[in-house]
Image (spheres, grey):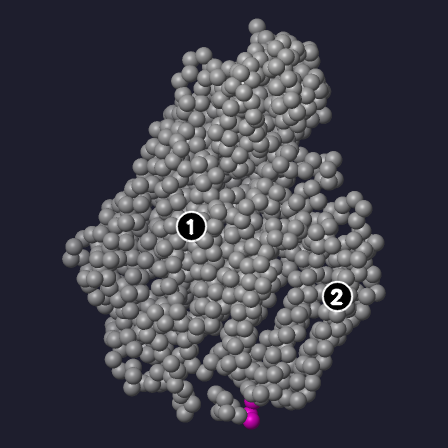
Amino acid sequence: MSAHSHVDGQLPHEPEKATLEGRNKVLGFWLFLGAEVVLFGTLFSAFLALRDKVGDGNPTADELFNLSTVAIATFILLTSSLTSVFATQAMHAGKKNAMIGWLIITVLFGLGFLGLEIYEFKEYVHEGHGFTTSAFSSSFYTLVGFHGAHVAFGVLWISIIIGQVLKKGLTVVTAPKIYVSGLYWHFIDVVWVFIFTVVYLMGKVG
Amino acid sequence: MAHAHAHTVKRYKGLMDWLTTVDHKKIGILYLLAGGFFFLVGGLEAIMIRIQLIKPLNDFVSAEKFNQLLTMHGTTMIFLAAMPMLFALMNAVIPLQIGARDVAFPFVNALGFWTFFAGGVLLNVSWFTGGAPDAGWTSYVPLASPTYSPEYGVDYYVIGLQIAGIGTLIGGINFLVTIINMRAPGMTFMRMPMFTWAIFITSALILFAFPALTVGLVALMFDRLFEANFFEVANGGNAVLWEHIFWIFGHPEVYILILPAFGVISEVISTFSRKRLFGYSSMVFATVLIGFLGFMVWAHHMFTTGLGPVANALFSIATMLIAVPTGIKIFNWLFTMWGGSIKFTTANLFAVGFIPTFVMGGVTGVMLAAAPADFQYHDSYFVVAHFHYVIVGGLILGIFSGLHYWWPKMFGRMLNETLGKLTFWTFFIGFHMTFLIQHFLGLMGMPRRIYTYLDGLGFNNMNLISTIGAFLMGLGTIFFILNIIVTSVSGKKAAGDAWEDGRTLEWTIPSPAPEYNFAQTPLVRGYDAFWKEKMDGHKEMTPAEPLGSIHMPSPSILPLFMSIGLFIAGLGFMYHNYYVGGGGLALTFLCMLIRSLKDDHGFHIEPDELHDKGVKA
Amino acid sequence: MMKRWNVGKRLLPLFAGMMLLLSACGRADLSTLNPQGPVAEEQFGLMKLAISIMIIVVVIVFAISLYVIVRFRRRPGDNKIPVQVEGNHKLEIIWTVIPLILLVILGVPTVNSVFGLSKDYTKDPDAIQVEVTSHQFWWEFYYPQYDIHTAQELVIPTGKKIAVTAVSGDVLHSFWIPSLAGKIDTNPGTAVENGTANANKMYFEAPKAGVYLGKCAELCGPSHALMDFKVKAVDEASFDRWTAAQKTPVALPSDPAIKDALVKNCLSCHAIGDQGVLVYPNLTDIGSRLTVGGILVNTDEAEYANEGTTYENLKRWIEDPQAVKPGTLMPKVELTEQEIDGIAKYLSELKIDYEK
């Protein structure tokens, strides 16, 4: 079997922190998320600076946004965060199959969110809100698109991890990956909450 | 640990060893080679700039070429020379100073180097494909926008820096985790050497500053490649937004550069004064404070942008405040020397020369902080003089000091002191000759970034002197290279404690450090761990663990290929060839996938291989 | 505030001497160290205060450094271990508090000056309003009170506040008259275009008649170095004559061939009097300006490569604008030798005689 066979069968309670490599990975990932906060913070600032620059004849945020689609997307993503928590809990309990189940549900929710977002973007382009239309549109697609790309990457990443766990089992090598991908998933969820508020709600109100 | 699962790992020799290495010491050497190379390129660009300005209305280079030279000089020196040379010192020293066998993420460490190198090469490819970027290292829009820079130059800037920036960011994360998680037993935060502290704070600054640059570059890239409107004024874009984003990154970047130099100076002065660093805790506090304030002052680069009196007043005061922790450091260094027994090695000459030089750069910094007076200094040669005093007089003197100091540890040979002193004096005198006079040029009305000046304005003599100084600095650099070549052939072999007054852990192990750094992890019993043992009459550190098998990470070619993928992708997108661009990205992602799927079990070095600790395993 | 500066000077005659030395530095029409107007003077005052404080700091550090280097160097054969001092709270407090005090001394007048110099004179009827628009690589000046457009040469009356509103027509530039006032960036995008007020405001004043050199201080393209302008301060009567003369019609060349060439090639971009279009520099009084293209200095006693008579300079400019100002938008127009001669001669005689 794989390395660290000495922990076979007897996975520690927090397997992601059982080895120095695991602890490094978790800490490094937290720091990476710190960098991501700055990244999205800057994107948000750029969006806030440019969101009124719609240009003559182009749809404004208020005319454009359809809150019900966005609300459904929000609900889906928030729920996926919950299923991701269940997956991590299952991992801590050493229940491999339950964990994989929850991860698959998380991935499916992620795909659902992405589908809605693509549909939404298509609608916007149809209404004359293209990437190159105005400063508002460029900053909108960049901010929301960056988030969408993060979701897409997350979906891909978690899928690969599911494959690895199926092949190698739940070990002190795979556990940090699962844990860290969970952190990532929560992070993009939190970012979405801000996008929902700053981009969509404030776009409707302001 | 049982080693029933010792894997046989292919170990490469020669060039393949260097291309696949994940050993932080070798990566440090790679950073030094690449950074040193770019330092020479940037230096050559500087010399050409100074030749052009040697007399009024000179036509050594054209106006267009001059703008490319000044842009590439700035960009190269900051991103491709100074930062990598700092990373060289970080890699060579930090794990040794904290008693670690490696960095937290050896693979990522290699990846960081190769992405930086790919980005740096990509930037310089522009020289051969129709012209380098020419909108200044700050790349202000609208000048850098597709409307006013329709050529490919600025694309190279945007994409080259983006790729190099990835390397810096992951390097920063790597060192943060290394310092937090991998210190030897007993090394509490308040026992860490000052250089480690400086790198710790620098890495934190990298972590929070570089993503802002990433976003700025992405926005400019979208504007240039995909017709976005972030900075296109006609479509509602905002040119001042770029200035904000750039300097929110750019000002912390200044401290990212200078804090490691502070760390080097602290180590060198303390070692060669045979004295404990004066006011260690206040030094730590000052470093943290400078790092923190570094994020609060970006708009002092924008006093003339028109942010209004309230912003200008606030940023003036905030900027002036940085003088306080910096002053604390200066006086702590002086009082470290006070009462000491100072030995003037080349490393220490650079360190001692650093103090007054940096103070001069610091005081002009405070002068610049006074916004109304800055209306006069801004974008004049006064500013050019100021930032060269802090970056060359601060950082580069610091890097020279650090290189002379840790050279024996990195390469196992001592540098020649005579040549070293020649390096110092030519470089030091040349530096002051070049830049002191530029303060006055600026005050007398010479704007920066001008490719020529008219005769009869009173600028001629000062520019001539400045150019002669630049040649002296070049000569100093040549002496340094000469020193490297001469000593690599016939240099004196360095002892473990090469300077005999070593205070920190890196001097407890052989020079150069063996692959596994420490045969046994040392037990740290106080600040200046090695010095403490020496004073207590011990010859070496007390080990914190029994002799055992040492786990090492496997070498990997993937970081190189990932960077090549990014390089290809960058070129592809730049020329709107999306197959090439997509192919490059695919290569990178494929390597990531392989890395993710294939567990790295590494290999073990067994105790019987360790017995001869003096020889590199 | 002024008083404190004087006290500082009295205490430190050495630095006052240094200041004198600095004041002698550079040309009076170009140097920030030789201010010719109240704004530059106030900025110079702040510079002097800052320099004085900073010289104290530098002298102290240099003195301690020298003392330490000489006194505590290791003598050959000296192997003693110095006392390992951890620190000294009293000293550390001193070098934290003293810099703070120095910063207060510098900070208070700084803040004062920030607000003082940001005073808005653009609504002041007594001030001369000037709208500065920067272009690659020339300066456009518009006087809304007189509806006058001119280029490269800002004519102002002495002793009056000049209220500047600055914007850019293309990339960033920076408007700087070192001997009269510090610089202000010209940002692209005017209030009309996109709903944001990107225009910057500043004011200055020239009590003495004379010519002051102006510079562009923000990298703006190849000819950034050559984007000079002049500020010409004249007495109020001369200024009135100048504004009046700008309004008087100007005759086109008498030679019909030259006139045709001028109308066809020049007036499609430039204006002379009420003829032509106002897209690029207004040529109405180009013959009485001090320079051609801001960089070729008009003089009868040429000394340097960029000097010549007005006629010679105009000819040089028209013949090959790119050779004079790389990157300029002025094209090399297909003209015969005679046409260039004629146009240059005509333009060099477009003079307004307003200085008495």
For the stretch drawn in magenta, what is the main secondary structure?
loop
Q: Which one is nearer the viewer's eye here, B425 or B315?
A: B425
Q: Secondary structure at mark 1?
A: helix
The amino acid beneath tag 2 is Glu
Q: Which residue is mark 2?
A: A117
**Residue B328 shown left or right of residue A112 in the figure:** left
Quadrant of res B483: bottom left
Quarter the C terminus of chain B occupies: bottom left
SS label for mark 2: helix
The magenta-colored residue range is: A9-13
| Residue in the picture at 22% in, 60% down | B487
Disc 1 marks a residue whose amino acid type is Met
Q: As drawn, is B303 to the left or to the right of A110?
A: left
Q: Position of residue B45 (x, y in %)?
A: 39, 45
The answer to whether any part of residue C112 appears in the image is no
The stretch drawn in magenta includes residue B471 = no
Q: CA distance from mark 2 to mark 1?
A: 43 Å
Frontmost residue, C322 versus B161: C322
Say which chain tag 2 marks. Answer: A
